[in-house]
Image (tube, rainbow, N blue to C red):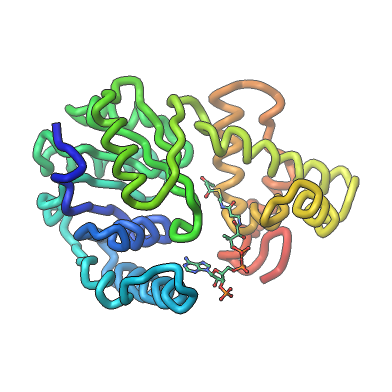
């Protein structure tokens, strides 16, 4: 089994918001980082975003190392096989089970048999993803929070077959990346979304039933329970389509009526109101 000292290079799959954030913190932690994406423009955009984020953190004195030095540790790659040099791989593509499975089938063939494969899934079964590989004991969930460079947490999810060694190494790696980790068993929503999404869903019911305005729901929860953002603002920030997909997974997986997706949330998604990323969600951006 590999120990933390032997991990020099981290491979990240997917250069979207989550993948680029994970690549950034891996490089900040001193790892050589291979950032893979099939989309060259997406990769370039990710690098620009990382550069901007690092400059901001440096200006604010939150990192000591000069941004170009950190950036110099990130290498863009466009072939999955280029990840073969990585000692640990974290997949962060869209929440599409078939896409993730096809990537893990390929990776399992490419990567040496001792390399741990992690998925940043926020809602899919880690056990099911692991089952397409020949190394389910070396497979684990590593769910980072958005925005990755600012949020202190990573939720580690143990699949049915994840070994203690894999878990311990992932926990050590998370600490090296400056994240506090919590451990969840593999059930729908894990810890964070199991608790967060019903709150967001309930905020939509509160709005739909005319109990309060969006602003009052958000101000109430923000100031009344000391949250950095109210639940409707947070939903816009996460993406209403993502919130809807996750609450549906809770409802399907756990069956209880308390997870029933709010029709107003569904209506926004049907209307193409995806939140901040589409310019319109509960609020206009
Ligand atoms: N890198 C560096 N700086 C960044 C950044 C990044 N990636 N993203 C934002 N910033 C900067 C902003 O530009 C801003 O800079 P200025 O002060 O110079 O303008 C600064 O960080 C913070 O700005 P704010 O004044 O808006 O922020 P804040 O102090 O409230 O912090 C926040 C922002 C950390 C996002 C905070 O609002 C927060 O914690 N919100 C809740 C986030 C949350 O709950 N995330 C988890 C979502 S759930 C999830 O991710 C799981 C899932 O599966 C759905």
Residue 86 locus on image (x, y percent): 15, 50
Q: Quadrant of the N terminus?
A: top left
Residue 229 locus on image (x, y percent): 68, 56
Q: Is residue 127 visible?
A: yes
**Would residue 44 be found to the left or right of residue 219 on screen?**
left
Task: State which image quarter holds ligand 1.
Answer: bottom right
Residue 165 locus on image (x, y percent): 24, 27
The residue lying toward the viewer, choosing from 214 and 268, is 214
* Name of the residue lying farthest toward the right: 211
Q: Quadrant of the C terminus?
A: bottom right
**Would residue 157 be found to the left or right of residue 109 on screen?**
right
**Would residue 172 be found to the left or right of residue 108 on screen?**
right
Tell me the residue at 45%/73% (across/down).
Answer: 61
The residue lying toward the viewer, choosing from 236 and 180, is 180
Q: Quadrant of residue 129?
A: top left
Q: Is residue 272 visible?
A: no
The residue lying toward the viewer, choosing from 9 and 257, is 9
Answer above or below: position of 243 versus 77: above
Residue 126 locus on image (x, y percent): 37, 31
Answer above or below: position of 236 versus 173: below
Answer above or below: position of 216 versus 123: below
Tell me the residue at 19%/62% (across/down).
Answer: 78
Tally of numbered discs: 0
**Would residue 264 be found to the left or right of residue 116 on screen?**
right
Answer above or below: position of 277 versus 140: below
Tell me the residue at 24%/39% (across/down).
Answer: 117
Tell me the residue at 85%/55% (across/down).
Answer: 216
């Amino acid at each position: 089994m590999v120990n933390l000292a032997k991990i020099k290079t981290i491979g990240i799959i997917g250069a979207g918001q989550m993948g680029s954030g994970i690549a950034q913190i891996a490089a900040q932690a001193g790892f050589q980082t291979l950032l893979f994406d099939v989309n060259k423009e997406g990769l370039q955009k990710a690098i620009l975003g990382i550069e901007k984020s690092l400059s901001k953190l440096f200006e604010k004195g939150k990192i000591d190392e000069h941004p170009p030095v950190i950036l110099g540790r990130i290498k863009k790659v466009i072939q999955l096989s280029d990840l073969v040099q990585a000692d640990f791989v974290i997949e962060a593509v869209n929440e599409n089970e078939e896409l993730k499975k096809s990537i893990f089938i390929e990776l399992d063939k490419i990567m040496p048999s001792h390399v741990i494969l992690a998925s940043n899934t926020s809602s899919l079964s880690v056990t099911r993803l692991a089952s397409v590989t020949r190394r389910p004991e070396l497979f684990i969930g590593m769910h980072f929070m958005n925005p990755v460079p600012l949020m202190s947490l990573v939720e580690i999810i143990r699949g049915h077959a994840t070994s203690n060694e894999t878990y311990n190494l992932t926990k050590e790696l998370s600490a090296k990346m400056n994240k506090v980790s919590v451990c969840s068993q593999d059930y729908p929503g894990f810890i964070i979304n199991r608790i967060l999404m019903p709150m967001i869903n309930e905020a939509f019911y509160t709005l739909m039933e005319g109990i309060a305005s969006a602003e009052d729901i958000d101000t109430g929860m923000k100031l009344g329970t000391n949250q950095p953002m109210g639940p409707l603002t947070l939903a816009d920030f996460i993406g209403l389509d993502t919130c809807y997909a996750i609450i549906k997974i809770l409802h399907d997986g756990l069956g209880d009526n308390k997870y029933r997706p709010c029709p107003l949330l569904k209506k926004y998604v049907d209307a193409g109101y995806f939140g901040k990323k589409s310019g319109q969600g509960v609020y206009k951006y």
